[in-house]
């Protein structure tokens, strides 16, 4: 979906595990999100429960 977002100029969302030894399914307590806006002018780092 992110490749499509790059091609079409949409928002990019990436999910990373905070503690690499624990799994991260893109949501939950061990997940960190980085959202880059469509204009690529702003990136936001947040926990899923802050969205």
Image (cartoon, rainbow, N blue to C red):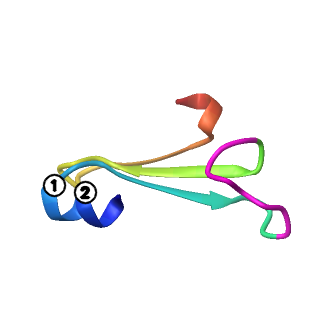
Q: Which residues are magenta?
A: 21-28
Q: How many marks?
A: 2
Assess disc 2: are there few (<14), some (14-19) or many (≥20) residues with their C-alpha within 10 Å of its C-alpha.
few
Q: Is residue 15 above or below residue 51?
A: below
- Which residue does the image show at 61% across and 38% down from the upper left? 48
Quarter of the picture containing the N terminus is: bottom left
Of residues 51 and 44, the one nearer the viewer is 51
Q: Residue furthest right?
A: 21
Q: Position of residue 38 (x, y in %)?
A: 22, 48
- Overall secondary structure of the magenta section: loop
Q: Residue at x 84, y 62 (%)?
A: 22
Mark 1: secondary structure: loop
Q: Does dot 2 land on a helix, a strand or a loop?
A: helix
Percent of width and height locating residue 2: 34, 61
Q: Is residue 22 above or below residue 11?
A: below
- The furthest residue to the left: 8
Judged left or right of residue 35, residue 8 is left
CB under 8 Å between callouts 2 and 1?
Answer: yes
Residue named by callout 1: 9
What residue is pinned by disc 2?
A: 5
């Amino acid at each position: 979906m992110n490749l499509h977002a790059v091609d079409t100029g949409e928002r990019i969302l990436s999910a990373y595990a905070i503690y690499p030894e624990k799994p991260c399914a893109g949501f939950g307590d061990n997940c960190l999100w980085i959202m880059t806006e469509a204009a690529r002018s702003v990136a936001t780092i947040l926990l899923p429960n802050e969205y």
